[in-house]
Amino acid sequence: MTRMILALTATVAIASAGAQSNTSWDGTWNGSWGGRTAAKIIVAGGRVVEYDYIGTPQKVGETTVSGDVLSFGMPPTFIVTLKRTNASTASAHYHGPAGDAEAVLAKQ
């Protein structure tokens, strides 16, 4: 019984730590695809709540976070992957029907 309680406590602690680390992405991330096309991604509670492409909100689909990588989208329509480069910047990769694009995003 004691081992089961310890295992459950450890599992809850690990899950809580994971949830807390996801919120480190929270904020507004701005940049431009290919240095030309405006992109804004708003993250709250560890998930993408808004994605604007050229100032127009787009559907965001599901969000997944693993370490320094956040991904969201609606495969096969599109997928956006952000890789944190430091606390306030991330490199981004878009893959969709129009092809691929790269961006550097800054956290506001």
Image (cartoon, rainbow, N blue to C red):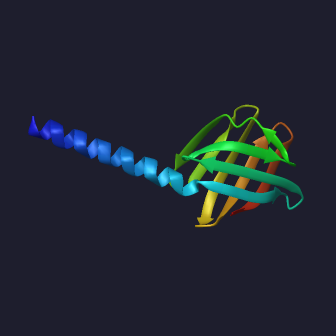
Query: Measured from the top left, where is residue 108 in percent x and y?
Result: 69, 63
- 103 relative to 3 in the view: left or right: right
Nearer to the camera, 94 or 14: 14
Q: Residue at x 78, y 60 (%)?
A: 31
Residue 100: percent from left, percent from top = 80, 47
User: How many numbered discs?
Assistant: 0
**Residue 33 position within the rendered picture, expressed as x and y whole percent measured from the top left:** 83, 55
Left/right placement of residue 57 relative to residue 22 reads right
> Observer-nearest residue: 87 or 98?
87
In this view, 86 is above or below 98: below
Residue under the point 34% across and 48% down: 14
Asked if residue 17 lies left or right of residue 77, the reply is: left
**Residue at the image position 31 percent from the left and 48 percent from the top:** 13
Q: Is residue 94 left or right of residue 11?
A: right
Whether residue 68 can be seen here: no
The residue closer to the viewer here, 78 or 44, is 44
Q: Quadrant of residue 11?
A: top left
Estimate the x, y position of residue 27 in percent, counting from the top left. Answer: 63, 56
- Residue 21 makes an appearance in the image: yes
Residue at 10% x, 39% y is 2
Q: Which quarter of the rendering shows the N terminus?
A: top left
Residue placed furthest toward the left: 1
